[in-house]
Image (cartoon, rainbow, N blue to C red):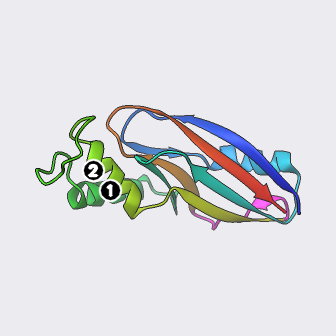
Amino acid sequence: MTVRHHQLLVATTGRGFTEISADLRDVVASAGEREALCHCFLHHTSASLIVMENADPDVLEDLAGFMNRLVVDGDPHFKHVAEGDDDMSAHIRMALTHTSLTIPVREGKLDLGTWQGVYLWEHREAGHRRRITVTISA
């Protein structure tokens, strides 16, 4: 088995989505494997990784709106507010989504669906520099 690791650093501008599909395609291409698995692990507890439609931006807007209604910043029941009103809500949003994804690689390319993209979803209001370990296993 061949295993290759690559670090991605993604700068976010605050709460929202940053598509990383092109970055992952570059990592897969540089690994040179025809058939493999691409595993992505986000090293943070206030952001997440998701696979979502990338054709219509309304999908991301609706998803963000739903999450904003589901998990409210500054909820008076939260005890963990050391870094502000968005602190605990960011952790809950991450727990409801994912910090890792595994995507098949077929014929040297990410095997995503036609309208799928991979996104880093920042759950904090302020921008951050997020680290993702990408592992290609063949």
Number of marks in picture: 2
Pointer 1 with pointer 2, Cβ within 8 A: yes
64 or 101, nearer to the observer: 101
Residue at 73% from the left image edge and 43% from the top image edge? 6
The image's mark for residue 92 is 1
Amino acid carrying mark 1 in the image? Ile
- Give the magenta-colored segment's residue range: 107-115
**Where the N terminus falls, by quadrant?**
bottom right
132 or 10, nearer to the observer: 132
Occupied quadrant, residue 37: bottom right
Residue beneath label 2, please?
A: 89
Amino acid carrying mark 2 in the image? Ser
Residue at 85% from the left image edge and 66% from the top image edge? 35
Marks 1 and 2, Cα distance to the nearest angstrom? 5 Å
Pinpoint residue 14: horizontal percent, then vertical percent: 38, 35
Prevailing SS of the magenta stretch: loop
